[in-house]
Image (cartoon, rainbow, N blue to C red):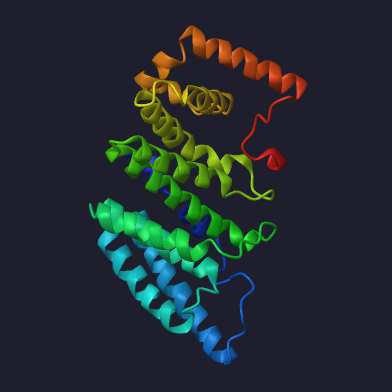
Amino acid sequence: MHTKRLLSLIFLAALASPALAAGAPAAAKPDAKAEADFDAYFDTRMKAAQKAMSEKRYASVREQVLELEKALKRVDPDYGEKSQWAYVLDFKRFALYEMGEQEAAVASCRQTVKVLAPNDWPYLAEFNVVRAARRACHNMLAYEQSAVATTVAQHEEAIAQIERCFDTVSPIEDASVLDNFYETRATVYLKANAVTKNKYQEQLFDTLVRADARKLALDEDPQFASIMKTPAYLSFKKEFKNDRKNGSRKTTDNQEST
């Protein structure tokens, strides 16, 4: 699995973020000083994790975020501060995967999408990092499920995961937040299509056309390049472009942000 598909925009955003501890609306803590002290502690440890991440010291990243996870469980067991949880769980997922602990990374993803999904606030920028963590996890779950799928049902579960990734987007986010995930989406549909007698050909073509329109260079992959030269695909692409001109087809995955 390519690093491009693993590295969440959370990490890149965090490097430029002046206040990691700024979270979404949550229940007030009884002690304002204790809250401020914890936020300062969180920022210090998270910045250390960022530095270790940039230096590819993944064991150190894991150590930092596991300590933060324990601390968060003590002060926020109900997962109210979702942005803080998003930073921690996303770094945890990435570090585990890079260290070769694939099963643990997948398990972490399942935990992340479960605890971060409720009570999304689509028009709050503070929730962008939460959505980014969820997208990255749904993407990983889709990719890993597709890689080992041997039945139609297993391929359909991979499809469900990648579509949840693409559904996890807010009108205030730019369409580019989905760019890293088109390759997984195309891979998932390609594999599912192969075992279902072209049941998912339209979805595969649609993904490739959208990625091509966004200049994501999926045709650098020989499998995709071959498909994108076929008469069936070229006919679909022509129809897609016509539909975009007359507005009869939704031609972006985040219509309101483009």
Residue positioned 56% across, 64% down in the render: 118
Please, which residue is most extreme toward the left here? Answer: 100
Q: Nearer the viewer, residue 113 or 215?
A: 113
Residue 142, x across and y down, in percent: 40, 43
Location of the N terminus by quadrant is top left
In this picture, is 33 found above or below 84? below
In the rendered image, is residue 16 in sight? no
Residue 228, x across and y down, in percent: 46, 15
Q: Which of 253 and 160 is in front in this view?
A: 160
Residue 11, x across and y down, in percent: 46, 55
Left or right, residue 106 beside residue 72: left
In this picture, is 27 found above or below 227? below
Image quadrant where residue 103 sits: bottom left
Q: Which of 198 and 16 is in front in this view?
A: 198
Residue positioned 53% across, 55% down in the render: 13
Location of the C terminus by quadrant is top right
Residue positioned 39% across, 31% down in the render: 187
Residue positioned 61% across, 61% down in the render: 120
Image quadrant where residue 90 sits: bottom left
Residue 8, x across and y down, in percent: 45, 50
In the rendered image, is residue 21 in sight? yes
In this picture, is 181 found above or below 196? below
Left or right, residue 67 beside residue 32: left
Please, which residue is most extreme toward the top here? Answer: 231
How many tags in the picture?
A: 0
Image quadrant where residue 215 sits: top right
